[in-house]
Amino acid sequence: MSAVDLREPVPAELRTNEFVLRPITADDAAMDHAAVMETREHLRLWEQSSWPDDDFTVEANRADLVDLEQRHAAGRAYTYTVQDPVGTECLGCVYVFPTHATFLAKATVTPLCDDAWADVQAVVYFWVRRSRMETGLDERLLAALRAWFTEAWNLEHKVFVTNEQFTQQVDLIQRTDLVCKFELVEPGKNGTYLVYG
């Protein structure tokens, strides 16, 4: 089953002592914007684009979040904000896509092992704000996500994706037992995306 063909609603949240994941909404624009702008140099590597520009505004971010909220509600893709337990600070974001999402369908995927791209149920991207990377939150988030997608989503074949140029996240993933199973190249983007499972 793919992420958009789940027979039950996707999990509403993931809660730990350190953070909470819940579906992002347009009302999160200001908090999300603060995290995005603090982390913009890393996000440009992760996105392989100029986003976010230095003059990126809260209102422009709100427009982006409206789209993410609508995609989530429609079951086309799922975006979760990562917040502190009391909901006063955005710590990052998690994005969950099916392999037939438009940008993935246009990408060139090269297998590095015997796994088949067609068997992948969910493609996961995540980022943590810069100041929280320094405390190792990204490592703890990844560990929590791996368990969450297995136990709450019931997904055996999920993969985590980052760009080879975002070396901080590559190093983080390579310190786990995850293995690089595919390389993914998006049209018009520099660098190769590394897909771990």
Image: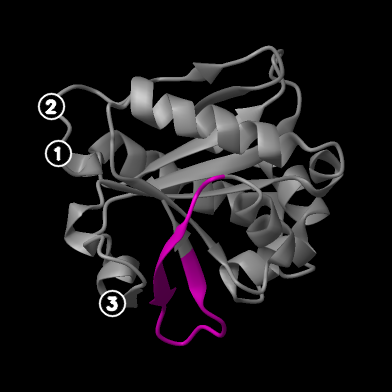
Query: Residue 106 bears which disc, if any?
Result: 3
Query: Who is closer to the viewer here, 110 or 60?
Result: 110
Q: Residues within 10 Å of mark 1 (few under 14, many from 20)?
A: few
Q: Secondary structure at mark 3?
A: loop
Q: Which residue corresponds to mark 2?
A: 7
Label 1 is placed on what type of residue? Answer: Asp
Q: Residues within 10 Å of mark 3 (few under 14, many from 20)?
A: few
Q: Which residues are magenta?
A: 177-194
User: CB atoms at circles 2 and 1 under 8 Å apart?
Assistant: yes
- Figure label count: 3
Is residue 61 located in the magenta-colored stretch of the structure? no
Name the N-terminal-most of marks 1 and 3. Answer: 1
Along the horizontal axis of the image, is 195 left or right of 122?
A: right
Q: Looking at the image, which residue is at 82% across and 52% down?
A: 38
Q: Secondary structure at mark 2?
A: loop
Q: Looking at the image, which residue is at 26% across and 58% down?
A: 99
Is residue 183 located in the magenta-colored stretch of the structure? yes
Query: Residue 5 bears which disc, if any?
Result: 1
- Asked if one can make out residue 87 in the rendered structure from this viewpoint, the answer is yes
Vertical arrangement, residue 58 with respect to residue 140, above or below? below
Cα gap from disc 1 to disc 3, whole angstroms: 20 Å
